Image (tube, rainbow, N blue to C red):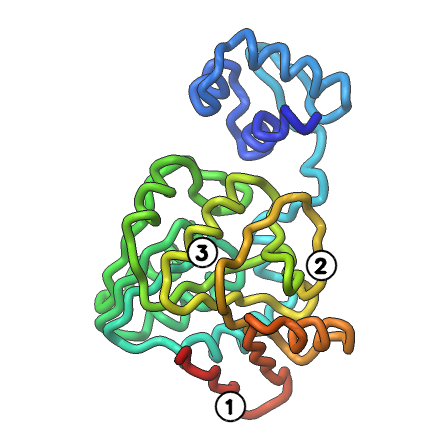
Amino acid sequence: MARHQRLLDAVIDGVQRVEELADVLGVSPSTVRRGLSELEQAGKVVRTHGGAVPVSVTGELSWTQKSERNAAAKRRIAECANTLVNDDHVVLLDAGSTTTFVAERLAARSGLTVVTNGIGPLWALHDAEDVEVILTGGRVRQRRGSIVGDYARAVLDRITADIAFIGADGLVPGRGVNCSSSELAAIKELHLRSARHAVVVADSSKIGAAPFPHWAIVPGHYTVITDDGLSEKARRSLAEDPRCTPVIVSLGSGPPAAAPEES
């Protein structure tokens, strides 16, 4: 079923008519029909008149569901991330629940330019009058609240940002950022290499986790902002990665930690 993963991803994201699927994937309608038949035999979709619907979402939470999980940790991480941003910065914001919390903090700033492929960050910034917001074009993955595809990659490939904040389904130091699809991995890699300072924002449940088979490779030095719910194994893995600067925020009372600036 690996060769039909893009087809299944599209159906899960709400593209469920044969003609629309063929257009999105750049294949013929007959190829889509054959793929849907095989996915139905595998128990992944149910065929409908003119298309298909997913049987389940295979464990992948929507970005709105994710925003409710570990929300306190994500808010503290966002507060810390905000300390790294200067008012004249060009900021890349990945799609995701934690990056949406970062966007909420940035909305109060002035003089920023924020480039995002995320519906959550866009919504958080939609009435920020003193922040210039650039939304990448591309195909919307509704469930993930992300924008992917050739148009999104073309925009990100032509930008050099001061700082990028990248979300993660999982992070394994020395391996990379874990993603639910190859399309998302490609976008995250562009975020990582298009900024002078790459920052992965991930709560402690994500460190060491790898729930999906796709990876975005971190090309150089990066910062990880996470919370103090880390296991000892996760702490060691961050400390032992020579390219990683870990910043661990406390979930207790008091001001957020200030992340070290990239030298």
Question: Image point 37% across, 37% down: which residue?
Answer: 138
Question: Image point 57% across, 60% down: which residue?
Answer: 67
Question: Residue 225's quadrant in the figure?
Answer: bottom right
In the visual, does 173 lie left or right of 192?
Answer: right
Disc 3 target residue: 94
The disc labelled 3 sits on which kind of residue?
Asp
The disc labelled 1 sits on which kind of residue?
Pro
Image position of 192 with respect to 18: above or below:
below
Quadrant containing the C terminus in the rendered view: bottom left
Disc 1 target residue: 255
Name the residue furthest top: 30
In the visual, does 57 lie left or right of 21?
Answer: right
How many callouts does the rendering have?
3
Image location (x, y in percent) of residue 131: 25, 66
Question: Image point 47% across, 78% down: which residue?
Answer: 79
Disc 2 target residue: 209
Quadrant containing the N terminus in the rendered view: top right
Image position of 176 with respect to 62: above or below:
below
How packed mark 1 is, by other alpha carbons closer than 10 Å (few <14, some 14-19, many 20 or more), is few
How packed mark 2 is, by other alpha carbons closer than 10 Å (few <14, some 14-19, many 20 or more), is some
Mark nearer the N terminus (1 vs 3): 3
